[in-house]
Amino acid sequence: MKKLCNFLFWFVGFNAAFFIFRDAFSIIKLIYTGAITLLSILSIYRLLAEKRAGNLVFSLKMFGILMALLLCYWQYDSELFAREITGTAALFLMWGIFSRYPSDEECSLYLKGYKISLAIDFIYAGIQLIVLLIFKININNYLLFYIGTAEDISTKISTRIAGLCWDPYVLGIFCATGFFLFKSKLIRFYILVLLYFSSSRAGQLGLLAGCILFYWKDIKRKLNMRNICVFFLFLALIPMAVPFVVKTLDLDRGFSRQSSGWRRVEYIVCVPDVWATDSSVLPVLFGGAPVNSGARFYYSGIPTVTNTESRTPFWGIETDFFGIIYGRGIVGFLIYLYFYLYIFFHSKNRLLKTLCMCFFAAGIGYYFEFSIFSNFIFFFALNKKSKEFDAIKK
């Protein structure tokens, strides 16, 4: 049973980056879901057999989600509730996996599989970037068409690289976490190039926060006038390169009313307006739409750019911070903060804390909280008994 669990942890990590293929081929998605289901069953069985206290920290997160689901059933229509149940199903499966404390071996195997998945994704993203620069063609348009997820080649046109994902933001967080898993300076430089050309602000913010945490002791030791001058000189040179790259890849997204940045600003300023439309304090405390948090916008009826462009309630707000505030309320958001604080103050593993910091900071600009790959890393970091170890040797 132990060997089977170890293999399943590696297998789930190995499948982290293959979003496109899981969406296109039901057999791949079925095997992936089956592996998570089996791992959940085996974890619960081992917990009961060992007769030991389980990991209750993740249960607190699930409490917030359950309260939001109950409120969704009470105040919204049945179709939204059904979609919420479907959207949280993976988390309930992982709840079984996360009911016990993992071993360092399981963590190492998962991260090794995750690293292989990232390596394949980065190689493909590099090819995508070269073709885009030379021929002005995004090969993802052709890949999506030929595997059957796009009706024609021009359906999904993007001048940003996304790798084997459907969104450059996901490639961005893969770059941010991969930077700490790969030790080669050359590979790290290559990852930085991919992150830049993905133009993922969330990934860039995640990497910056991760670097500050991971290298803080070195930063304090090497903080002198010479290094400060070199750093600011580097910052001064960046604007010289930016116009060329932006013009080459058409990355000038800015903050127009049609941009994702504008919608994220709306999420922030409209919190009081949405709360003001609630008939009771319960939605303010517990939300009511943990997955499709955009439903809170939709049913509020307030005039916004987001509501104008999104005529249905079936979408999620593209930021963990405000998606949780809307979807799970103040209580859910406090649980979210406690979740990270627990990791940062109790985990003894610097690598795992750094990866979680990447997700935390990137969550300001995008939503990763329901991603299976991020929750597995949270799961390992929650184990305060885990020793300091370098999960990836090479």
Image (cartoon, rainbow, N blue to C red):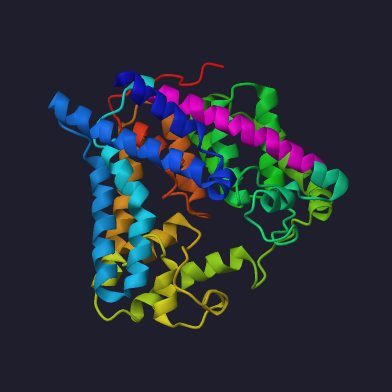
The residue nearer to you, when weighing 98 against 382, is 98
Q: Residue visible at 27% across and 81% down?
A: 279
Give the left or right position of residue 17, taking residue 157 as reference: left
The percent coordinates of residue 25 (x first, y second) are 55, 46
Give the left or right position of residue 105, taking residue 100 as reference: right
Q: Residue visible at 58% across and 25% down?
A: 182
The percent coordinates of residue 285 (x first, y second) are 26, 66
Q: Quadrant of the N terminus?
A: top left
Q: Residue visible at 71% across and 42% down?
A: 235
Please determine whether, in this image, residue 81 is positioned above or below residue 45: below
Magenta span contains residue 260: no
The percent coordinates of residue 155 (x first, y second) are 70, 62
Q: Is residue 215 visible?
A: no
The residue nearer to you, when weighing 92 against 57, is 92
Give the left or right position of residue 2, taking residue 310 as reference: left
Q: Is residue 97 visible?
A: yes
